Image (cartoon, rainbow, N blue to C red):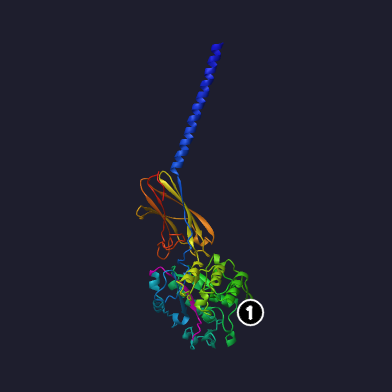
Amino acid sequence: MARRREKKSWSSRKKKLWLVICLIIITSGLYAIFVYLNTRNTGTKFEYTLSDKSFGNPLMGYVPSAEEKTVSEDVHLVYVDITWKELEPKKGHYNWETIEESNQFKRWKKEGKQVVLRFLLDYPGKSSHKDIPNWLGNEISDLGDAYSTSYGKGFSPNYQNKLLRKYYKDAVTAMGQRWGNDDFIAYIELGGLGHWGEWHVHSDAGIRQLPRKEVRKDYIAPFQPAFPKAKILMRRPFDTGLEGDFGIYNDVFGDKSATKTWLKWIQNGGAYDQTQEQAALKAMPKAWEKAPIGGELTSSQSMSTLLGNNLDELTDEAKAAHLTFLGPKVAEDIGDGQAAYKELLKNMGYRLWVSGLTISKGESKVEITLNLENSGVAPLYGDWPVVLYLCNANGKVLQAQQLDCRLSELLPDQTTELKASFAYSKDQNYQVKLGILSPMTQEPSVHFAMKGFEGEVMPKLATIQKDQKGTDK
């Protein structure tokens, strides 16, 4: 009986022993898997600091005249205005070479700069003149109205005339065939109507009023098919009746009263005082999300006033408008070491930066995740390729991967998470770099708003060390 109990006890202890051994084996196996996975996928995190420095970038900033011989390093856009008379001095014969030479098209293309274009029919000056071709007078009897006003002297065309509108469309189509097939013309400020192309006339001087909606449309619509790659801006938020996203420009930034009225038009819509149409302007408070807001500084105040006592007011206007560019009247150095110039620039356009980056190393692949943020006042109006590069220790690109990112949709104060995966070897050191490519040059062209990286368009964000026990830097 005792032997039987002893045998049973030994059998019980044996079962418990095997159970303990099995538990140890299972636990050890799970721990080994845990260690293996964590060794293979060690996440190394990097954080970056938002810069408060001012710098220029493509598709935004100051826009001096394209005729300038020297421009500031921050300039990426130049302004070109062309009168119809300059463009087409003879019917069907266009003055391409002269216009391109005087506006230095070859130089700006080589430098990767882009153009803000305005096509004009009426530019007031000191002497009597026409800004539409003389040959139009041979075909149109009632061509328009000569004027002499406080604005200057000039000639306001008869915008209602059907033949004038037909030839205007022909001229716009010809410009599109010449200049509309690439990204060189970035933005178009519609300038077909009114003095300086600003969609108003001095009606008290006996000039007939501007046309109403149905005719006005003929001075807008031709640009859309002619320049499919350009963003188009209107002087006011007109109800065009046309499809497409339009930006808006204001040629009197710094004029508090006029800019306040302009911002109200954008917010609420309203009447068009030039035609007495009560609902000609429509509310477009989110227009800036799809197309740029531009314009230039007012000429009614001195530069020292605009950038001195009124600087805070001016930067508030830029923020409220979600301003992307200013020109051809741009800010200047007022003897403050360009402090005001830089402060205003800092409140224009986009400011893209990488706030964080994580590297996870596997057996033969490395996974990289980064957070790209926009701390500006507007998006970058173009879905330019965002590319992450895996480089060797000397910075030579070994692999490049375009990230899934639509920059045009990255609005202010928004973040997008981007991921990439590269094949790699544990036995090599690597650098991780980032670039945003210009479609004109196919080169990295955008400066990032991170401390220490402001001057770079292809910053080295991290290194990956071959020694797994080491630390990524």
Magenta span has 439?
no
97 or 295, which is in the foreground?
295
Instruction: Give how far across and how far down residue 184 sits, in percent.
Output: 43, 69
Could you say where residue 459 lies in the image, as x and y percent from the top left? Answer: 41, 58
Q: Is residue 122 magenta?
A: yes
In the image, which residues are magenta? 110-125
* Farthest right residue in view: 278
Seen at 58% across and 66% down, the residue is 286
Toward the viewer: 333 or 379?
A: 333
Residue depicted at x 49% and y 30% = 24
Residue bearing the label numbered 1? 276
Seen from the viewer's position, the closer of residues 235 and 342 is 342
Q: Is residue 369 visible?
A: no
In the structure shown, which secondary structural element does the residue marked by tag 1 occupy?
A: loop
- 313 is higher (above) or lower (below) than 351: below
Label 1 sits on what residue type?
A: Gln
Quadrant of the rendered structure where residue 244 is? bottom right
Q: Is residue 149 above or below residue 32?
A: below
Q: Does residue 403 show up?
A: yes
User: Label 1: few (<14), some or many (≥20) within 10 Å?
Assistant: few
